Amino acid sequence: MKRSELFFSAIQVPVDFLMIVLAAISAFLVRDIPQIIALKPKLYNFPIEQYLKIVLLVTPFFLLIYALEGLYDIRATRRFWKETLKVFSATSIGLVIIIVTIFLKREWFSSRFIILSAWALTVFYVVMGRWFLQLIQKWLLRYKKIGVHRVLLIGRNGKIKKISQFINRKPGLGYKIIAKSDTARLKKIKEIKQKKGIDEIILCDSTIPDSDIAKLVDFCAINNIVYRFIPTTFQTTRFNLGVFGGEPIVEINHTPLDGWGRIIKAVFDWLAAIFLIIFLSPILLIVALLIKKEDPDGPIIYKNKRIGVDGKNINVFKFRYMQWKYCIDKKNPHFKEALKLEKELIKKQSVRQGPLYKIKNDPRKMKVGKWIEKFSLDELPQLFNVIKGDMSLVGPRPHQKREVEKYKEYHRRLLTIKPGITGMAQVSGRSDLDFEDEYKLDLYYIENWSLWLDFLILFKTLKVLFKKRKNN
């Protein structure tokens, strides 16, 4: 571990302590605002000395919650927005405990305004303090090369090229590739370490012999080198270990979305979909009116036949963004011409690889259609699919039958859970990803699902909606 990372991790604790105390003092200083606005006399008189004693008693408790929430990770490349969510979550947990304590111990104080304003100010001050520290740390990382991790890449396949390009494209991650090796033989790695130094080794090739890997892992442990590897699909699978008939046995867990996991996700989807429909109803109405005004001949909601869980046919609801005469719908009197045109456009203008297609600069879109597709507003009616039980808020995107027919056998794992309105692939590249990359991301989601992961993907979806697609 780098000294700079240890330093910034250590200094984070007193900075958080200072920010929490500062937030509490700020809340105390503005405590008269509700009375001033409402022109009411203050109903309590609480001395600041006693208040500060309580603050100094409570602050270490908040730091403990922060530590349990993983807010003192030592790496320099922490995601700011993830930290913000964790600070909000941890501070809220502390707030609930404080409220319960005050309820049981009335002699403290009972100013709801101080409690709530201290909570809001704590989140703000702690986040700003962390943002400032990260700013300094990343500046030192990028411009002074303090805290940079020297990385050795091992492999002889396409993955090593992909990882190399990613690291070179993002210097703020704190990695520097010092060498690449097509072998994991210790003789060569020792030479590289002696000449250039190694902080991390990333194995990008699963074909490296096990005997070499075993020696490499031991070498990394002895020399305090971080060892990581890009796994195969099988290696990412979760396992349960047990004993059967006196023999050790391994059971592969295909997904946590079995049993209670499936029930919890279904309840969350249903409640969240109802809330979102009510909240977004003005937007739904405006989009519907704009579509009807521009092209009154066709339906507002377009039923797109897709393949759902277990390979079953479902009708996915979408706002129609194409001119009705070009829609692939048998109710369209120009259906045959529309189908012929689509095949020609796929052949000439599709920018995706694999079984899926994406037509760049599609001439069939309405004017309003270009706008609603850009911000994915066309997919909002799928909230009704969620209520019906055909779809989930988060999951692999549903594909057309002709696309599914081009799946390789292993791709059919995407059909083992309900398709989603958004998913891992959508927040990682939207329609810009190749199908194989999309599959890997969706497979990771299937094997590592959690309700927290759903929250993160939904949160990131809001950010991604305003990012321009390359393949539009």
Image (cartoon, grey):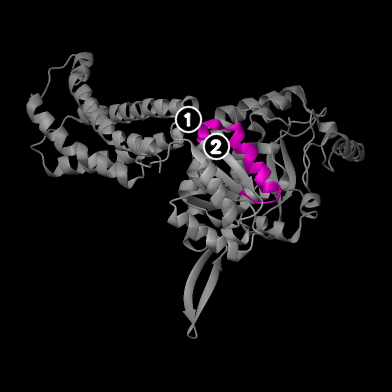
Q: Classify residue 269 as left or right of residue 422.
A: left
Residue 384 magenta-drawn? no
What span is colored magenta in the figure?
A: 154-174
Q: Classify residue 89 as left or right of residue 232.
A: left
Image quarter (top left, top right, bottom left or bottom right) of the N terminus: top left
In the rendered structure, which amino acid carries the disc numbered 2?
Lys
Using a 10 Å C-alpha cutoff, classify the residue at mark 1 as few (fewer than 14 neighbours), some (14 to 19) or many (20 or more): some
Report the residue marked by disc 1.
Answer: 145
Could you say where residue 440 lies in the image, as x and y percent from the top left? 64, 50
At a point 47% along the width and 61% down the height, the residue shown is: 260
At a point 79% along the width and 27% down the height, the residue shown is: 361
Could you say where residue 328 lies in the image, as x and y percent from the top left? 83, 40
Say which quarter of the image contains residue 320.
top right
Image quarter (top left, top right, bottom left or bottom right) of the C terminus: top right
In the rendered structure, which amino acid carries the disc numbered 1?
Lys
Task: Work out whether mark 2 precedes mark 1 in sequence or the reverse, and give the earlier one.
Answer: 1
Report the residue marked by disc 2.
Answer: 176
At a point 46% along the width and 47% down the height, the residue shown is: 452
Could you say where residue 270 lies in the image, as x and y percent from the top left? 52, 48
Using a 10 Å C-alpha cutoff, classify the residue at mark 2 as few (fewer than 14 neighbours), some (14 to 19) or many (20 or more): some
Q: Classify residue 157 as left or right of residue 357.
A: left
Residue 230 seen: no
Measure how far apart labels 2 and 1 are at the Cα level.
Answer: 9 Å
Verify CB contact (< 8 Å) between mark 2 and mark 1.
yes
- Label 1: element kind: loop
Residue nearest the viewer, comparing 302 with 452:
452
Residue nearest the viewer, comparing 117 with 123:
123
Q: Classify residue 178 as left or right of residue 472.
A: left
- Label 2: element kind: strand
Residue 248 seen: yes
